[in-house]
Structures are given as C-alpha cells and as structure tokens.
C-alpha cells in the first residue's frame, strides 16, 4: 500500500486539489489522505501556527473515496498535522501539494504555500511534489491538467514506492495552461530568479503589490519561467539546504572571524 498525502494552499474546497486527487486515484494500490487548509492560504510561505491550537476536522471531499480533513492553519501546518496527529506509526510515503491556481516559478517558491507544504514534508523526511498550473487569470479552468500531470504523478509515486527519491529535495512542477496536444514536452529546469520585477501601485486603500514581466521570451535557457512560456511542463528539484558552501572557506578568512575569541597573546 502506497500512502499518499495531498494538500494545497488554495483551501480544501479548491478545484485544483480535487483535480489532483482524481489523478492520484488512478495509481494502483494507493491510499489517499487529503489534509488542507479550511480556507485559502495563498502566499503565506512557510508560516506555522504555534500561538493557537490546530483543530483538524473531517471534511467531505467531492464524494471521492479518500479520507479528508480541513485544518485551521497554513499549508505547512497541514503537513505537520497529518504527520504528527492524523497518521499513526505508518507515515505517508509521499506528499503531493497542489494543484495551485497559477504558477510557482523561480523565487515564487519562497512565498508559495504550495511549495512550502512540500518543503515541510521533506523537512520531516517525506518525499514531496509541488504542482502548479498557469491559470491564474482563469482560476476555475483546469483544462487537461489532470491528463498532463498524470504520467509525472505515476512516475514519482513509483519512485516513492521503491524508496528511490533523494532526501532533502522536493520537486516543483509547473504546467502551462494549454491543451495536452499543445504541450511540447517535459523539461528539467532551474529556477528563474529574476524573471519579474515587483512594483507597488497606489490604488484605493493604499499600495498594492503587482508584478511586471518581460515582453520577450528567451528561448536559449534552462530556467523554468522561460521554458513554461514556450509550452513545456517544467520539473525543478529544489534542495532544502540553502547553504552556499563555496563561501564557507572565504568566511573563515575574514579578519573579524579569525580574530574573534583570541586572547591578548593571540592564543
């Protein structure tokens, strides 16, 4: 039995998590639990709840044959609640988070509740996948997203069954809002960290954060934003260890570091 945990940041009543659960039900010998926020928690990042109690409540889930709970917390809380409170000794084998309304590309992974749920799973030692669909301006339209992602879900689930997924990595998958026939393929991709600029516009009530994107699409890159805009599904392995190890030796040579803690005789 493959134990699959499904979560998201758009809330347990969102269409994307239903699409994801339906796709996962096609995986043989899989037991699926859905644990998701009781309301939308987009953009909350990796926030966790510790100043109030979590209270998971059983929730009907579109009539699908899964067990589901709604949690009064953030996506990371949902993973923690499932891991520590709802599962017994047998923990989930893999976590799937999504399918998010809108993409999560580049530095979005730091703001995204979808990606943070996957990151929290990896912190707890469980392989995880974050899935996002480029339908931000068509939030209820998931087109053929289920058919597009199903082969990827099946492959990752099988790797989880075989215990062959690496530790400390979650998989960030982004899908263009295109028909299956127009998808060019699946490409491994690096994070596109500088593909938009933050801008604040003064409107009613104050200043509203928006983004400005480049008009031209770069075609000679392996970065996720540009590949998705060309019609590719992108898959990015995201390591949770953000240490820049190439700079550790340099830090050790800083005068402030070398001299700190030494006595008057330099000993």
Image (tube, helix red, strand yellow):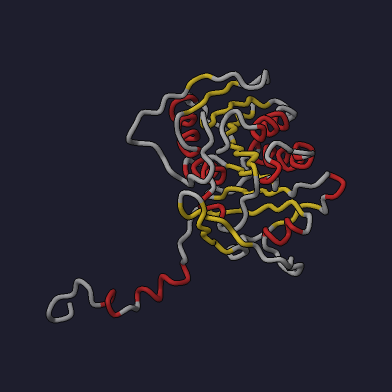
Q: Identify the image quadrant of residue 98.
A: top right
Residue found at the far right of this picture? 181
Q: Is residue 186 above or below residue 26?
A: below
Q: Is residue 265 above or below residue 162?
A: below
Q: From the image, which quarter does the C terminus lie in? A: bottom left
Report x, y in % for residue 176. Answer: 74, 49
Towards the viewer: 120 or 143: 143
User: Residue at (65%, 46%) from the top-left corner?
Assistant: 102
Towards the viewer: 234 or 165: 234
Report x, y in % for residue 221. Answer: 71, 67
Q: Is residue 249 above or below residue 86?
A: below
Q: Identify the image quadrant of residue 249.
A: bottom left
Q: Identify the image quadrant of residue 108.
A: bottom right
Residue found at the far left of this picture? 264
Q: From the image, which quarter does the N terminus lie in? A: top right
User: Residue at (75%, 29%) from the top-left corner?
Assistant: 26
User: Residue at (71%, 42%) from the top-left corner?
Assistant: 138
Towards the viewer: 206 or 21: 206
- Number of marks in picture: 0
Report x, y in % for residue 130. Answer: 61, 44
Residue found at the far front of this picture? 204
Report x, y in % for residue 187. Answer: 74, 56
């Amino acid at each position: 039995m493959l134990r699959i945990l499904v979560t998201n940041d758009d809330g347990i009543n969102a269409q994307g998590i239903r699409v994801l659960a339906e796709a996962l039900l096609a995986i043989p010998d899989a037991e699926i639990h859905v644990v998701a926020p009781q309301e939308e928690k987009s953009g909350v990042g990796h926030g966790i709840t510790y100043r109030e109690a979590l209270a998971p409540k059983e929730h009907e889930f579109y009539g699908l044959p899964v067990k589901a709970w709604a949690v009064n917390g953030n996506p990371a809380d949902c993973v923690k609640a499932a891991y520590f409170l709802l599962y017994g000794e047998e923990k989930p084998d893999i976590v799937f988070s999504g399918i998010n309304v809108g993409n999560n590309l580049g530095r979005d992974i730091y703001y995204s509740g979808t990606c943070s749920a996957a990151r929290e799973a990896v912190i707890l030692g469980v392989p995880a996948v974050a899935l996002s669909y480029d339908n931000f301006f068509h939030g209820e339209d998931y087109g053929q997203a289920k058919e597009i992602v199903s082969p990827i879900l099946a492959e990752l689930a099988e790797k989880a069954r075989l215990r062959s997924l690496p530790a400390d990595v979650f998989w960030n998958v982004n899908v263009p809002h295109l028909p299956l026939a127009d998808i060019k393929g699946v490409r491994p991709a690096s994070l596109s960290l500088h593909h938009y600029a933050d801008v604040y516009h003064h409107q009613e009530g104050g200043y509203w954060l928006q983004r400005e994107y480049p008009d031209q699409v770069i075609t000679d890159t392996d970065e996720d934003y540009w590949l998705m805009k060309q019609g590719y599904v992108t898959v990015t392995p995201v390591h949770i260890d953000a240490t820049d190890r190439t700079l550790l030796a340099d830090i050790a040579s800083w005068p402030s570091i070398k001299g700190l803690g030494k006595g008057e005789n330099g000993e």
